[in-house]
Amino acid sequence: MVQVRNTDYENITATPYAPNLGAEIYGVDLSKSISDAQFSDIRQAFLDHQVLFFKDQSEIPPARHIEFGKRFGLLHSHPAAPTMKGFHEIFEIHATKNSKIANGEFWHSDVSCDELPPLGTMLQIHIAPSCGGDTMFSDMYAAYSALSKPFQEFLNGLTATHESEHIYAGRYADRGVVDQDIDYPKAKHPVVRTHPDTGRKALFVNRTFTTRINELSSQESDSVLKVLFEQAEHVNHQIRFRWSLNDMAFWDNRCCMHRAVWDYWPEERKGRRVTIKGDQPF
Ligand code: SIN
């Protein structure tokens, strides 16, 4: 069903990207300080569309990128990923012909293994391959609401374990990260969470970090997680964003998942990511 989403903002222009989620944002220059009125529209658009794609941007200076992130809350430090020299708040996404992995290749909500998983993530791409390197997003409100009522009722009240050692151990070794001192996060979250700002319910499990539904037997948990991962990744709930140089994406980790497509090897892709701390899911 096509939802009618708000596009009525005074200080920005928002064009829906697809029926479920996403909007392209025009009329904002993120390399400069933005007014309170524009900030207020961006914040509302973020809640209305779940992921925003800021178009027609130039390269945002790192300090400005950090400042923009801080307007949404305290910044989140990644437990394992390499940061930018001189800017520990920035996680550099970088894949080259020598990379063994590219970041975010499987469906996930960023660092959902944290006790307080990130509210949102802002990524600007500065080096893009000649084609490919898209990022896919999936709408977790839609994934939940498309389930049958009895199944929704069954899921409400269940919790899941999200772990990270199996993902992060050794992952960034080729970028100079020494792993042994890392306290790999692990957390228990509701399977269905309520978005603190919109009040809407969203599925909150993902193939990267979610390992177990706590109240079920191991066999039951495996079967239910299989159904939920397939539901969360269903093509009807997805969009696939094709980047232009210096586009900035800002996604809401509380109600969408994403996946980066590494189809451009041996070409290079590089970007800077700032992540905002979130609250305890409920
Ligand atoms: C990520 O932050 O998970 C990677 C997203 C991307 O590189 O497109």
Image: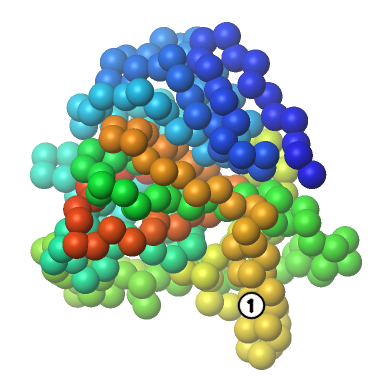
Q: Is residue 158 left or right of residue 171?
A: right
Badge 1 is on which residue?
Answer: 226
Q: Nearer the viewer, residue 158 or 26?
A: 26
Q: Residue at x 57, y 25 (%)?
A: 15
Could you say which quadrant of the image residue 97 lies in?
bottom left
Count all numbered tags in the image, as a single digit: 1
- Residue type for callout 1: Lys
Q: Can residue 278 be seen from the camera position used here?
A: no
Q: Position of residue 279 (x, y in %)?
A: 53, 46
Q: Residue at x 41, y 10 (%)?
A: 35
Q: Position of residue 144 (x, y in %)?
A: 73, 56
Can you tell me whether the CB of the residue at mark 1 lies under 8 Å from the nearest atom of ligand 1?
no
Q: Position of residue 207 (x, y in %)?
A: 52, 70
Give the quarter of the figure containing the N terminus: top right
Q: Nearer the viewer, residue 167 or 53?
A: 53
Q: How is the image coloured?
A: rainbow
Q: Residue at x 64, y 21 (%)?
A: 7
Q: Nearer the viewer, residue 98 or 89?
A: 98
Q: Position of residue 172 (x, y in %)?
A: 21, 66
Residue 17 position (above or below residue 257)? above
Q: Can residue 147 be seen from the camera position used here?
A: yes
Considering the numbered disc 1 on the image, is that residue within a helix, a strand or a loop?
Answer: helix
Q: Spot the residue most to the front.
A: 130
Could you say which quadrant of the image residue 155 lies in?
bottom right
Q: Residue at x 48, y 52 (%)?
A: 136
Residue 60 position (above or below residue 123)? above
Report crowding for label 1: few under 14, some 14 to 19, many 20 or more residues within 10 A (C-alpha). few
Residue 272 position (above or below residue 157)? above
Residue 45 position (above or below residue 178)? above
Could you say which quadrant of the image residue 171 lies in?
bottom left
